[in-house]
Amino acid sequence: MVEIPNLNYVDGLSKGDRSFTKKIISIVARELPVEIKTYQLELEKKDYSKTADTVHKLKHKIRILGLEKSYGIAEEYELNLRKGNLDLKSVFEETLETMLFFVRKKNQEL
Amino acid sequence: MNCIVVDDDETFRAIFEQLVDNNPSVKIQGSFSSAIEAIKYLNFNEVDLIFLDIHMPDFDGFDFIRTIKNPPNIILTTADKNFALEAFEYECIIDYFVKPVTQERFDKGIVKAVSLFKESAVTYKNPVPDESVNDLYINIDRRLIKIDIPTISIIEARGDYIYLKTDTKNYTVHSTLKKIVDKLPKEIFLKAHRSFVINTKKIIDIQDNSVLIGKDVIPVSRSNRSELMRRLNLL
């Protein structure tokens, strides 16, 4: 079952300051597509070490959006990539799509 | 206590700025997307604490620590627990945050940082155990050399060593500023800067943010300037 992203972490830090939540969502909405593009390009080039570095960066954002299970998968996928193994690629990419949809929607709402 | 954030990820810089904002004990002085930018800033500014991301492209957190002279206290921020072992090799690293850090964990780290910060300030103010002791013995090449304390003019931190200037001779000793200050009379010696302790009796003049001692111009940090001014017999 696909995990649903949430803003519990960000809202917790905001202490009711809506502008902080808005700021974070807007940064993630801007950075995420760029990082996903980088990930795809590195994967195409079969540069798995660099792909793993980008997954490492992306996994922080996975956790910010409260996706604990997906974070564990990303961690494992990063290790796989460092060994040149693409196991968990599709489930990881599914998470990225879910996140992208979520932040775009939230960015419009906020 | 003031701090800076060094992280190539804008999201995390914003998160750390918020974590700091939510904690009254710490104030943010700067936020940098690269280690190089932060190093440039530290060349002209003094900070008490750095939140440092380890995993940065080109110039990572450990390169940063190795580059700066006398780093202040540092809290590492990363997702990678594997860096913990290497982190223990650096005395300046006081804690380790796994991203994204919660406010509770952050506050706990700040309590520790504040306590270490205060401890270091107290250390500098501690009197010598016996005020009548006028000599200090330093260990150089397994020889204990006696130094007449009032003849010491400047002590400079140089990595794992301190450079001791006296009226007659200079010495490089394997020690830290903290350790030697404990052995010196607090009425005479003052920490002028993160890297310098000076003998206030040897000051020739004071200009802006520096003092002249012998032929050496020693920087005085903003935070220590008021203590220096307090000790002067001003007309």
Image (cartoon, grey):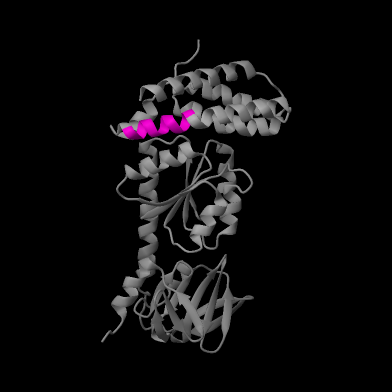
Q: Examine the rendered structure and indicate whether residue B42 appears above or below residue B156.
A: above
Residue stretch in magenta:
A19-29
Q: Position of residue A80 (x, y in %)?
A: 67, 25
**B200, B176: nearer the viewer:** B200
Q: Position of residue A43 (x, y in %)?
A: 69, 26
Left or right: residue B142 compared with residue A31: right
From where the camera sits, is residue B164 visible? yes
Q: Residue at x 41, y 52 (%)?
A: B3
Q: Position of residue B197 (x, y in %)?
A: 45, 74
Q: Residue at x 47, y 22 (%)?
A: A67
Magenta segment, prevailing SS (helix, strand or loop): helix
Q: Position of residue B106 (x, y in %)?
A: 39, 41
Q: Residue at x 50, y 17 (%)?
A: A98
Q: Examine the rendered structure and indicate whether residue A24 appears above or below residue A109.
A: below
Q: Does the segment drawn in magenta span residue A20?
A: yes
Q: Residue furthest bottom?
A: B168
Left or right: residue B122 compared with residue B11: left
From where the camera sits, is residue B182 visible? no
Q: Does the segment drawn in magenta span residue B226?
A: no
Q: Examine the rendered structure and indicate whether residue B217 appears above or below residue B167.
A: above
In the picture, the quarter occupied by the C terminus of chain A is top left
Q: Residue furthest top?
A: A1
Count of number-bearing discs: 0
